[in-house]
Image (cartoon, rainbow, N blue to C red):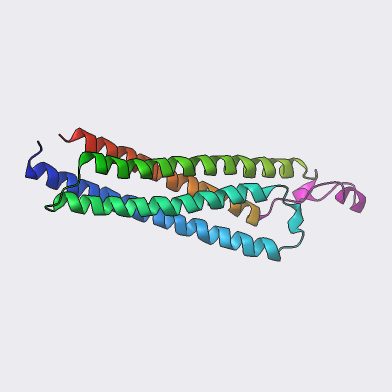
């Protein structure tokens, strides 16, 4: 059985690391939602918005991964409360703590899957679009206006922002996964 000092150290470590996880994921989530909102507003205002050949599925999966990130943030907040409970008189059991951390771990794994598949969709779409670029100086077609109708459009900054939002949500879930594994190791290592 662990003595009081071990529980206090475990409580302090869980609280600190849970706060770091929570605020890191929150900051990355704010970047993701800002970029997604800007992408939706900018994409609808941009001319020729139909030229983005398949960014929709990638952005949809990025949005799904963002919603899973919100659930992961809630799980992170519950881990902060778990750390507080370990420091107080009411100590949750190891199995309760493990179940809570495993739920956050599974949420981050699911978010990683959505973000990874979304990234592949976005990267594939932008690769196809880049391969249709016209040869010439800064994307200007060599053959005049008739050649312009046969080539693709240049990749815009809004399209690159969609890849950025996906990368941010992917990184947020990776941070959550690393911290969740550390939490599990700390919970099950203390005896």
x, y (%) of residue 161? 59, 54
Which secondary structure dominates the residues rendered in magenta?
loop
Identity of the residue drawn at 77% across and 59% down: 48
Numbered label tally: 0
Q: Nearer the viewer, residue 73 or 45?
A: 73
x, y (%) of residue 28? 44, 54
Q: Residue furthest right?
A: 146
Q: Is residue 53 left or right of residue 171?
A: right
x, y (%) of residue 168? 49, 50
**152 part of magenta stretch:** yes
- Residue 74, located in which quarter of the rendered image? bottom left
x, y (%) of residue 190? 17, 36
- Which range of residues does the magenta coloring cover? 135-156
**176 part of magenta stretch:** no
Q: Nearer the viewer, residue 43 or 144?
A: 43
Identity of the residue drawn at 22% across and 50% down: 83
Q: Is residue 46 left or right of residue 13?
A: right
Q: Is residue 62 left or right of residue 49?
A: left
For the N terminus, give its image quadrant: top left
For the C terminus, give its image quadrant: top left
Identity of the residue drawn at 50% across and 52% down: 66
Q: Nearer the viewer, residue 8 or 142?
A: 8
Identity of the residue drawn at 61% across and 51% down: 59
């Amino acid at each position: 059985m662990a003595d009081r000092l071990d529980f206090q150290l475990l409580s302090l470590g869980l609280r600190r690391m849970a706060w770091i996880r929570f605020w890191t994921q929150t900051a990355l989530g704010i970047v993701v939602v800002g970029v997604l909102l800007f992408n939706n507003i900018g994409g609808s205002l941009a001319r020729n918005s139909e030229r983005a050949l398949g960014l929709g599925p990638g952005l949809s999966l990025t949005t799904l991964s963002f919603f899973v990130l919100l659930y992961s943030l809630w799980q992170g907040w519950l881990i902060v409360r778990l750390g507080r409970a370990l420091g107080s008189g009411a100590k949750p059991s190891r199995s309760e703590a493990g179940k809570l951390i495993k739920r956050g771990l599974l949420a981050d794994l699911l978010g990683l899957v959505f973000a990874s598949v979304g990234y592949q969709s976005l990267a594939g779409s932008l690769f196809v679009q880049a391969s249709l670029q016209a040869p010439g100086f800064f994307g200007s077609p060599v053959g005049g206006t008739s050649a312009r109708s046969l080539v693709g459009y240049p990749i815009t900054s809004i399209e690159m922002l969609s890849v950025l939002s996906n990368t941010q949500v992917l990184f947020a879930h990776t941070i959550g996964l690393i911290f969740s594994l550390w939490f599990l190791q700390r919970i099950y290592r203390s005896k």
